[in-house]
Image (cartoon, grey):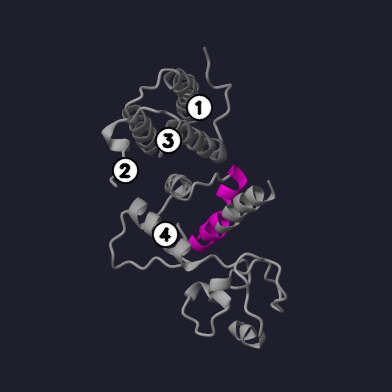
Amino acid sequence: MASFTLFNPTPLSTSFKHTQVPLIGISNVKSGSFASLTMYRRSSQFCISCAAKAETVDKVCEIVRKQLALSDESSVSGDSKFSALGADSLDTVEIVMGLEEEFGISVEEESAQSISTVQDAADLIQKLKEDNNGAAYLE
Amino acid sequence: MAASGVAAPTRTEVLQLYRSLLRVARQFCDYNIREYTKRRTIDAFRDNKNLTDPSQLSAAFSDGKAQLEIAKRQALVYSLYAPKVKSIMDIKPS
């Protein structure tokens, strides 16, 4: 999957989402994840859906860790499910609230119900931030 | 007054009430009331997490809804008379 990026000679610009990138199924490509040949970002492996930046995933992991009072040894990564980490539905609501405050976004009910892993949360944050930026850009 | 006619709230409704209470807590200008509201909802919902009796569930749920109405009203009233000086806890360390 990552090898597709090697065939793309043009560098991806930072602000445009719809570049001439021949990657199938990717609607939303951020320059930091794909322009470089060295795969130093682990989030680029999840490139089927829109990829969230690694910093976003890290911040989400941090908030989850703090909410569930996990020790530093336990691993929290992109595909950890909240229920596997010991969170019940009340914890999930609190985590989503914490993410709203941290990133300054507002999550609706249906989207919040569908979050089950760290990656879901990071992708949703990414999408909401871009919608906000897009709306501001159009004004 | 028979409460048996009232249906127990569904899981989604309970979570929506929880979310609404936490959201309204954020609207308070006063740090103390904001933190209290958050703390109180978290504690109350966790205490009642294991209820199974429908009449108890609906009693707790309607209690929560009444508190939500009160909190919404009070958030509005407090915002009309918000003090100019912010609490020390709200000032971010620079």
Tag 3 or tag 1, which sits nearer the N-term? 3
Q: Are marks 4 and 3 on the same chain?
A: no
Question: Mark 2 against mark 3, which lies toward the viewer?
Answer: 2
A122 or A139: nearer the eye?
A: A139
Q: Secondary structure at mark 1?
A: helix
Q: Which residue is mark 3?
A: B51
Q: Which residue is mark 4?
A: A59
Q: Are marks 4 and 2 on the same chain?
A: no
Q: Main secondary structure of the magenta part?
A: helix
Residue drawn at (39%, 22%) of the image? B82
Question: Mark 4 against mark 1, which lies toward the viewer?
Answer: 4
Quarter placement of the N terminus of chain A: bottom right
Q: Residues within 10 Å of mark 4 (few under 14, many from 20)?
A: some
Question: Mark 4 against mark 3, which lies toward the viewer?
Answer: 4
Q: CA distance from mark 4 to mark 2?
A: 19 Å
Provide the chain ID for the residue under circle 1: B
> What is the span of residues highlighted in magenta in the rendered image?
A108-125
Q: Which residue is mark 1?
A: B58
Q: Secondary structure at mark 3?
A: loop
Q: Residues within 10 Å of mark 1 (few under 14, many from 20)?
A: some
Residue B77 against residue B43 in the figure, above or below: above
Q: Residues within 10 Å of mark 3 (few under 14, many from 20)?
A: few
Q: Position of residue B37 (x, y in %)?
A: 37, 30
What's the amino acid at mark 1?
Ser
Question: Mark 2 against mark 1, which lies toward the viewer?
Answer: 2
Provide the chain ID for the residue under circle 2: B
Q: Which residue is mark 2?
A: B92
Q: Secondary structure at mark 2?
A: loop
**Labels 4 and 2 touching (C-beta < 8 A):** no
